[in-house]
Amino acid sequence: MQYEELKQLYDLPFFDLIQRSRKVHEAHWPENEVQLCTLLSIKTGGCSEDCSYCAQSARYTTEVEAERLMETEEILERAKLARENGSTRFCMGAAWKGVRDGTKRFDQVLEIVESVSELGMEVCTTLGELGEVEAEKLKKAGVTAYNHNIDTSPEHYTKIVSTHTFQDRLNTLRHVQDAGMSVCSGGILGLGEKTEDRIKMLEILSNFNPQPESVPINSLVPIPGTPLAESQGVDSFEVVRMIALARIAIPDAKVRLSAGRKQMSEELQALCFFAGANSIFYGDKLLTTGNPQSEADLNLLKKLGLEPQKPNPGQGAPAAEGTRPLEPALG
Ligand code: SAM
Ligand code: DTB
Ligand code: SF4
């Protein structure tokens, strides 16, 4: 969808917007299901990048200590536990600028992915920048989806990160698609951006071909010690509007209500599910910050008559339609 159309939708009276997104949601996701995804930080902290929201950047003094890459056995234990608890997707994150073929750590990651992928869950990784070869090897090892957020508009991105560019992010996403993995890409609300930046972000995501398979919508968790520590929270109705807009713009995507849920009331989360969110991170920790307790989440789903999504190990990457590629350069 194009900017003007998205902007008109965004500006509708609140109930008109969520009525529209609900219709799209019912047509594309009639099952009343919410996917439960478990996150694990397999390599925490000490990152060379300067993303101004992040607890793991080595440039800021935060409570997070740099750690080594976790051992395969320990990761496997955590993945099995996640599966037992009902997660159908296991997402492993590493605080790296990126990974490079031929390095010991990339070989270790491939070994980890091979082991985890035998458990029958969707396997997602988020390891920073990837080239063509790295993407192909991850796919071959069993990664089904790669998370790499564009986070905001290209214009606002330069105010948030200086150590890599928005175009670098798009290049990685292109490699992910070319290798046949699903793209998981979304953003953060609360980086001091304007509504226009948020809509621009969704415009770009909705014009990927194929569209992203999942779209995380994070609300900033302000981290003491980072430049965005004192950021104002995002208005609840604006979060719901963004969920609704994402549902309309990218109808087949899992719209994931991501970071920031711990600060949200049950009623706000219910409104987000109504507007089009159908996936959450599940388990008491995100990467370095807290998340609601699993029991509380299951309870909330039950109260709303929503079911955790059934396992879907065959999840592949959606095929591109037509010939229009994800634009490699910004237009
Ligand atoms: N290093 C990899 C990268 O940058 O793609 C993967 C990890 S990074 C932590 C994954 C995403 O988490 C970021 O792109 C951002 O959208 C989100 N995120 C990180 N810190 C956050 C925070 N404090 N609040 C909300 N979302 C955050
Ligand atoms: C995404 O969009 N959100 C998740 C996942 N992808 C990797 C990460 C949220 C991180 C929140 C801050 C933290 O826990 O450090
Ligand atoms: Fe954090 Fe990822 Fe940026 Fe590193 S690249 S500072 S882990 S968001």
Image (cartoon, rainbow, N blue to C red):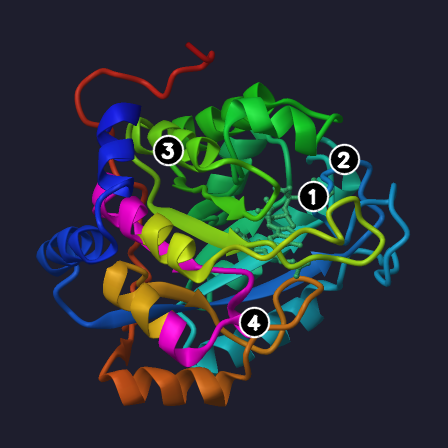
Q: Earlier in the sequence, mark 4 or mark 3?
A: 3
Q: Earlier in the sequence, mark 3 or mark 1?
A: 1
- The numbered disc on residue 238 is none
> Residue tagged by mark 4?
263
User: Magenta region: which residues?
Assistant: 244-268
> Residue tagged by mark 1?
107
- Of the 4 image quadrants, the one containing the N terminus is top left
Q: Nearer the viewer, mark 2 or mark 3?
A: 3
> Which of the four quarters of the rendered structure image does ligand 2 lie in?
bottom right
Query: Could you tell me the amino acid type at mark 1?
Result: Asp
> Residue tagged by mark 2?
103
Is there a contact, CB below 8 Å, between mark 2 and mark 4?
Answer: no
- Out of 198 and 181, give the one closest to the viewer: 198
Q: Earlier in the sequence, mark 2 or mark 3?
A: 2
Real-space Cα separation, disc 3 to disc 1, in angstroms: 31 Å
Position of residue 218 in the picture relative to residue 161 (left or right): left
Real-space Cα separation, disc 4 to disc 1, in angstroms: 38 Å
Q: Is residue 233 above or below residue 280?
A: above
Relative image position of residue 139 (x, y in whole percent): 47, 41
Q: Residue at x 33, y 82 (%)?
A: 301
Which residue is at the far front?
13
In the figure, residue 178 lies in which quadrant? top left
